Amino acid sequence: MNRPVLGIPQNTIEILRKYDFSFQKKFGQNFLIDTHVLDKIIQAAKIDKEDMVLEIGPGIGTMTQYLAEAAGKVVAVEIDKNLIPILSETLGGYQNVRIINEDILKLDIRSLVAEENGGKPVKVVANLPYYITTPIIMGLFEAHVPVESITVMVQKEVAQRMQTGPGSKDYGALSLAVQYYAAPYIVANVPPNCFMPRPKVGSAVIRLTCHELPPVKVKDERLLFDIIRASFGQRRKTLVNGLYHSDRLRYSKDEIIRAVERLGKGAGVRGESLTLEEFARLSEYLEEAK
Ligand code: SAM
């Protein structure tokens, strides 16, 4: 067995020098240089030799080495072509790693999982490029890619938004969307000095354990998400006004007020006080009003 050699600052610096690599800010490149954090991520991801792991943005392969030791197979998707020769060297000793030089947002991940894992659920593990955290995670959910869990490093505030419930200032469309598909759990906060170069923001590792079935049942998933988006579109608006002014929804003010009252709420209620279960009921009431 190989032993992971990256994750130690000297080794990372050495390989970057050898290939004369320059960091691309536009790709959100902040490489992990802390073995404790790497161990924590691997532990939280609960990987074994039966698993296929999809890694998004392997960088120079630091975490990929750990993943390759733990998993049966690793498929890693990296956009930056300058990293591919580096990955060939750092992952050269592993027979169970496939590197794909692609933009994850343009890849048909469902087909990839079908091809590489016979359509069985995979585990996603990544230190995500922060500029596209939400599209990556929502893309996996909305494309119904078979995924068992998603263990990722994200910006600290984003992790808080994913995990929080009604009543908090961080609660919003992202909290509800993530919690419809998965149970979130913040594993650890990670300071900027664990990366090279250091990001300007704090980071956190979050584990999303995907639900087999959503915790609420609705007839029309798209309507539920249109309602959620409209409710948080403008923070200071009441729920009724948010829904009424949405360009995706076509309900009269009376229909909306009646649906909100059926929920047992006054017309002045705001979206940020509703639970996922209440949003689901609201969407059923509006569906019936059609
Ligand atoms: N996993 C490495 C680590 O932990 O050291 C690197 C993490 S770095 C925060 C994010 C990585 O994602 C970079 O290697 C970057 O080039 C890659 N990346 C950025 N945008 C991407 C995209 N659209 N598709 C695939 N990879 C992307």
Image (cartoon, rainbow, N blue to C red):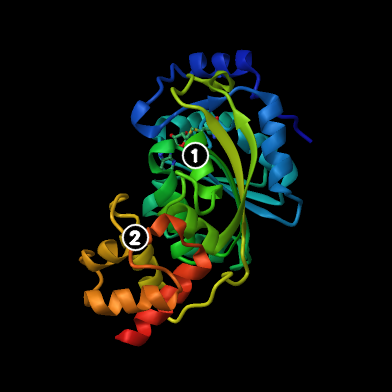
Relative to 5, is 103 above or below? below
**Left or right of residue 250, residue 53 in this image:** right
**Left or right of residue 20, residue 54 in this image:** right
Res 71 seen here: yes
Residue at x 57% of width, y 43% of height:
152
Type of residue at label 1? Leu
Q: Nearer the viewer, mark 1 or mark 2?
A: 2
Residue at x 53% of width, y 26% of height:
31
Type of residue at label 2? Ser
Look at the numbered disc 1 and say if its residue's Cβ is closer than 8 Å to ligand 1.
Answer: yes
Give the residue at mark 2: 231
Q: Quadrant of the N terminus?
A: top right
Residue 149's quadrant in the figure?
Answer: bottom right
Q: Residues within 10 Å of mark 2 (few under 14, many from 20)?
A: many
Res 5 seen here: no
How far from the left and from the top, in percent, is residue 23?
A: 41, 22
Q: Which mark is residue 209?
A: none
Residue at x 52% of width, y 35% of height:
156
Residue at x 38% of width, y 38% of height:
131
Q: CA distance from mark 1 to mark 2?
A: 28 Å
